[in-house]
Image (cartoon, helix red, strand yellow):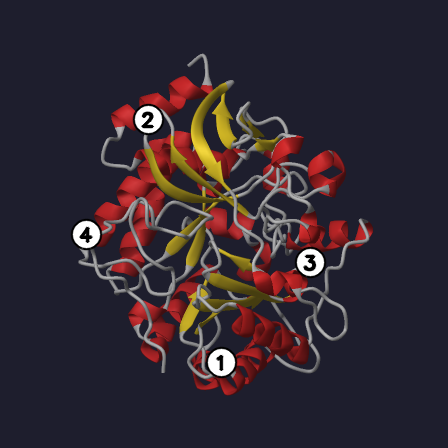
Amino acid sequence: MGSRTALVEDLMERFPHVPREAVLKEDLLRGGVAFDDSALSDNEDGDVKPKSYFIFSFDHGTLPELGAAALRRPPEEIILTGGPYDLRRTVVSVRVNPASPYRVAAGEDGLLGLYLDGKRISDVGVPPMPEYYRHTLSNGKSVMEVAPTIQWGYLIYLTVFRVCQYFGAKEECQYCDINHNWRQHKAAGRPYTGVKDVDEVLEALEIIDRYDTAKASTAYTLTGGAITSKLQGRDEADFYGMYAKAIEEHFPGRWIGKVVAQALPRDDVQRFKDYGVQIYHPNYEVWDRRLFELYCPGKERYVGRDEWHKRILDSAEVFGARNVIPNFVAGVEMAEPFGFTTVDEAIASTTEGLRFFMSQGITPRFTTWCPEPTTPLGKANPQGAPLEYHIRLLEAYRSTMDEFGLSSPPGYGPPGPGNAVFSVSSFMDSLPANEPTAEVSAR
């Protein structure tokens, strides 16, 4: 195809049951977007919520390679509406790529638009600076540094451990740049706390709770790098669990509590539950056995794929199957040189994994792979996976959910095109909008 526009429109036509909004969103997530200076934020001094780099870089270049976007951050997310495709409100996480055919820029009327191959294809909305970002902690740290919000303010993202103990080429997941992201922010002189103090987190949450008068923030996620031994004298369940315990004691029932951690033994998972966690995300990353062993060498070495999956199933007995939501990184199945070479093969493998979990009542979700250039898979695959893979995955995901009678997982806000706020993949955009919102009730 001669242009990205032709590719996108061809897929919209071939897969009419996939929302057209999701086709564009997946393309932006896998390939990134460029920003004119007119579309950049004024960091924490402006009227637009800036990109917080809440765990990974989610960029197609290092900070020194991003030019003006490294000094004046782009917005955390953008909303697409209107245009020639008559887009319904679509929230997209920002992944910066100066070489992208997509560009956000102000038009002659001063209003922001999204341009593809030089043609304006949608209006662009940016998140307003929340009032709670304008206040600092007593030690001078910003709320954005300690407790940033994403998904248009729905989710407080608490990366309380900014690095991972799976370290080096023989242990790090081959698509993950968490350790590099920490290093690049420190090298740039940006505040980027390695281990966040519990009292800092509580103070940041107090500020959010005080100024979030509309109660837009509905959930928090506790996460960070894997802990293979001890951190501050605690194992992984106790380290992340102590934050949940403190939050639930200080703010009982205010937010849905979620934790992203390794697939841990059942006794450890029970501790998460006892600490007040309501949703558990033991991410399985990629389904295929060979690819898991190659792409997740640390997880294979310390736990192993079969044991990882067993622990996920065991955790459903603690949390209930609906509240166990493992993530996979959609697209790495097709990463050269080891991945599947056809979309058919990749979709068949991924669907096998979906059926394995969904047949047990567990609903995985996924993040669209962003090939960050400092990772081995990113270096080898700067274009990511084919857009067709991502569109067919949305189709397979929804049909597998229908097969097993499942609805959208709790803790992700409303489903459906025009409603969804989950910003790092389109799985919520591609689900029916008329189903009941599956939320965990506040205690």
Residue type, numbered disc 4: Asp
The residue tagged 4 is 402
The residue tagged 1 is 268
Give the quadrant of residue 89. Answer: top left
Between label 1 and label 4, give the one nearer the viewer: 4
Q: Distance between the residues labelled 1 and 2?
A: 44 Å
Q: How far apart are marks 4 and 2 (CA)?
A: 22 Å
* Label 3 close to label 4 by CB (< 8 Å): no
* Mark 3: secondary structure: loop
* Mark 1: secondary structure: helix
In-front residue for pair 332/276: 276
Q: Position of residue 338 (x, y in %)?
A: 51, 37
Q: Distance between the residues labelled 1 and 4?
A: 32 Å
Q: How far apart are marks 3 and 1 (CA)?
A: 23 Å
Inspect this view and state whether residue 310 appears: yes
Give the quadrant of residue 61. Answer: top right
Q: How far apart are marks 3 and 2 (CA)?
A: 39 Å
The single residue placed furthest to the front in the displayed view is: 109
Image side of residue 254 versus residue 57, left or right:
left
Between label 3 and label 4, give the one nearer the viewer: 4
Query: What mark, if any, has residue 187 been given in the picture?
Result: none
Residue type, numbered disc 3: Phe
| Residue located 36% across and 57% down the image | 364
The residue tagged 3 is 167
Counting other residues with Cα less than 10 Å from the Cα at mark 3, is it few (<14), some (14-19), or many (20 or more)? few
| Residue located 50% across and 25% down the image | 115
For marks 3 and 1 on the same chain, the one whose residue lies earlier in the sequence: 3
